Each structure stands twice: as structure tokens, then as C-alpha cells.
Amino acid sequence: MERLPSFAKPDSPLLAAVIRQRTPKEAIAAITNAQYHGATGIDLHLSCLDDEYKNTKSIEEILKFCKIPVMALNYNHRIDYSTYSSDEESRVALLKMAVEAGVSCIDMQGYTFDLESKNSFRQEYQSLGYSFTKGNPKEIVCDEAIIEKQMRLIDECHSAGCEVLLSCHPNVYLNPDEACDLARFLEKRNPDVIKIVCTSNSEEQLAESFMTMVKLKKAVNCKVSFHLNGEMGKLSRIVNPVLGGHLIFAIDGYTYADSPQQLHLETAKKALDAMKLIQM
């Protein structure tokens, strides 16, 4: 199938509708509605598809109805957010099916090929002197052999004409300097987009996250997305993209399958349009 339009090259921010559906027909309907409601990109969660649809043919069926860039993810979460067991080779194999089917981009998580780092931090990394390791962050890999394997996957995607977003969810707060150090560390793997999602529960950290975004877009040469989870994080999801972040993730009609932390698609579009007018 012909490759869909670029996920990384459009002007920032891209308004990406989060699609978490069990069947191709449900995904197609959700994507069609999202496109009509202003989405300029699609965030397709492959792990939410029923097992019988986790294949290249089903993904191709979904993509036929897409007019905008699509990024494929496999976070090992079913539609009810329960986690299913999968070794890394199997998890990555599903992403490769999406590449074959024609997606614009895949989300390669920072812990890829090192499942232990998904939920824990390797204490031996502390001795390496990186500023971003102080809080024992998750999804951090410093093992050169694993990094080389990740880079081979990125090269393989690029050779097929597919982009790669390298995502990291440290599950801790990173100050501006720490976040920039992490972004520069990740950029060496040659992704097209870097996404960092930190955790915060204070107004002070929320305010500081805006400065982090300003510094991040100058720290790396690729597109970058940065926002916060947690009690105070929602505002960062719309303000940081206005400050230069590449992605706004949003929901077009909440269901039990969607996180209430995510922005509402049409509301986010109205807010983004209004802020663009203010900046004119």
C-alpha cells in the first residue's frame, strides 16, 4: 500500500486524534468522524484491536479511509487498559506490520528491546552521570547494545519510507535542563520526532514545563513533543504545542476506552485556533 502523508513534516502542532477501537470497522468510523471534526493526524493504538485483527491486512483496511498522517502504537494495553503479556520481538512485529501496511510513522517506546526498563530503572545507569537519571526514571535505556538494536529498527523503518517517533514516559518530573539532556540523548538514535511525557502534581512544575518546551525546541534538530501527566498536566497538553511542541493528542467523543486526561478534539481545535489569532 502507498505510504500515508508524513507525520513529522507538517507544521506544528499536529492535532492527533487518539483511536482506541477493537475492530477495523469501529476504527474506520472513529477516524472518519475525527477527520471531519478537525484532526490533522491519527494516533492509532494497535494493541486495542482484538487479536484477530492484529495483522497487516486489517491495518491496511483501516488506512484506506485515512486522508491524514497516521502514527501506529503498540503499548500492550487492551481497550480496557488491561496489560497483555508480549515479548519485545512480538510487540515490535505488530509495529512492523503497520509499517508494511503503510502508516506514516510508528511510536517506538524508549524501553524497546529492554522490557525490564518499562517499569523500573537500572541503578547501574546512575554512574554514567546523566542528569535525567537522578529520579530513577522509567523507559530509560543506556545499554549500548540495546540502543544499537533500536537504531537498526529505526533504520529499517526509514528504509521502508516510514518515520519513527521515539517516546519516553519517565513517570517522574524532569526540570528543563534534565528534559533537554534526555532529548539530546534520544536524538542520537535518529528519530523523526521525540516525545517526552513527565509526571507532575504542582502548579510550579506546570509553569516550569512551559519553559521546558521553549528550551526543548532549541535543544534538538528534530520535532519534539513534551507534556505532563498528573493532576496539573492537562493545561500543558494545549499550551506546550502553542509554544512549539509538535503534537496535541485529543479524543473525539469519550468512551470507557479513553483517558479523561486527554483533551477533547473539537475543544482543543477551537482553543488552538483562538490562540493562533491572538498571536497574529
Image: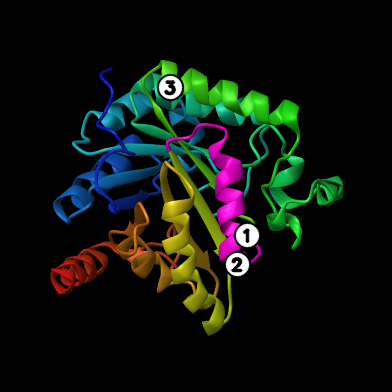
Q: Please give the label number shown on residue 261.
A: none
Q: Is 57 situated left or right of 144 in this image?
A: left
Crowd rating for badge 1 (residues with CA inside 10 Å; few <14, some 14–19, many 20+):
some
Q: CA distance from mark 3 to mark 1?
A: 28 Å
Specify whether residue 200 is painted magenta: no
Marks 2,1: beta carbons within 8 A: yes
Residue at the spot of label 1: 178
Q: What secondary structure is found at the residue carrying circle 1?
A: helix
Region in magenta: 171-192
Quarter of the image holding residue 26? Answer: top left
- How many neighbours does mark 3 have within 10 angstroms: few (below 14), some (14-19), or many (20 or more)? some
Secondary structure beneath label 2: loop
Compare marks 3 and 1 and give the one earlier in the sequence.
3
Determine which residue is flagged by label 2: 175
Front of the two marks 3 and 1: 1
Look at the picture and state if 53 lies above or below 248.
Answer: above
Q: Earlier in the sequence, mark 3 or mark 2?
A: 3
Report the coloring of the rendering: rainbow
Residue at the disc numbered 3: 158
Q: Quadrant of the C terminus?
A: bottom left
What is the x, y in percent for residue 231?
A: 53, 77
